[in-house]
Amino acid sequence: MAVHEDSNPHKKKSSDALDEIPTFNVENMQNNTRVINYSRTFMSIIGGVIAGILGFTGLMGFIFYFLVMAITTVGLAAKTGFAVHSYFDSWNRIVLDGILGGLLSFVLFWTFAYDIVHIF
Amino acid sequence: MGVGFIVGVVGVLILSHAAYSTIQYRSLLKITGEEFSGPPINVLVELIAGPVLCLWAALTVPGKFLSILPHSDENRVVTLPANLDFMIFNHRGKAFPLELDLKVY
């Protein structure tokens, strides 16, 4: 009896058990999530440097961070051609994913740039 | 990777030039004794142009979005049957002409 080897790299994942099970390609989904994280991290760093140069302190800086994240979200949605459901399984991924992680990078580069420009 | 990366580097260079201009502006303010209320207008222009370039680089450098729908054109899965029990190798197929326009890839 020959062994049936499954060399299929596209492992499907089903969401819930309805009549029609929506499946999607997990490997591409991980790739898309990774792209979003890279983009958001880079824009958090850039936003931190700008907030430091402009001299924001306190609440204004955090408001600026969420403004930068909103602009990045619009840019990512535009990158998908506004057809989000053909690249992600829900809106939450493109809107909320990576925001809290980017906040730490933002604060780090914000204090760094502020110190360099305004204190030393 | 090439063009977007260079655009990102140019954006970062513009931002670092804006930071350096702001440092010089602050030392000028220390000489004249005024307070720092905001960077000068050319630094503000740089602070708008730099992040626009960086945003463009941030969206294009990490890579393209790949479609996750199982039935889209770029996600075609073609697997040939791998069980040997149903494979017959001694048949009359070699008598037929060879067809080369099968879409297998």
Image: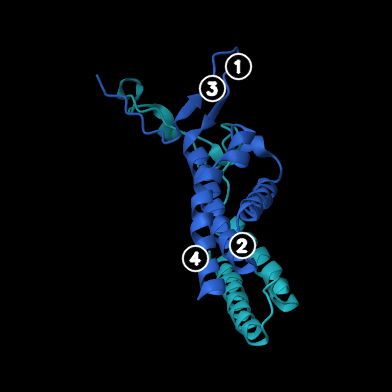
Chain colours: A blue, B cyan
Q: Are discs 4 and 1 located on one and the same chain?
A: yes
Q: Residue at x 44, y 32 (%)?
A: B79
The amino acid pointed to by label 4 is Phe
- Whether the residues at callouts 4 and 3 have beta carbons within 8 Å, the answer is no
Residue at the spot x=35%, y=21% of the render? B86
Q: Which residue is mark 1?
A: A20
Image-based side of B9 in relation to B53, left or right: left
Mark toward the start of the polypeptide (4 vs 1): 1
Question: Which of disc 2 and disc 4 is earlier in sequence?
Answer: 2
Which residue does the numbered mark 3 point to in the structure image? A15
Vertical comparison of A118 with A95: above or below: below
Numbered marks: total? 4
User: What residue sits right under mark 2 in the picture?
Assistant: A51
x and y, in percent, of residue B55 in the image: 63, 60
Kindly indicate the quadrant of the structure image that contains residue A94.
top right
Q: Residues within 10 Å of mark 4 (few under 14, many from 20)?
A: some
Pointers 1 and 3 in contact (C-beta within 8 Å)? no
Query: Do marks 4 and 3 both belong to one polypeptide chain?
Result: yes
Location of residue A5 (image quadrant): top left
- Which quadrant of the rendered structure holds the N terminus of chain A? top left
Kind of residue sitting beneath label 1: Glu
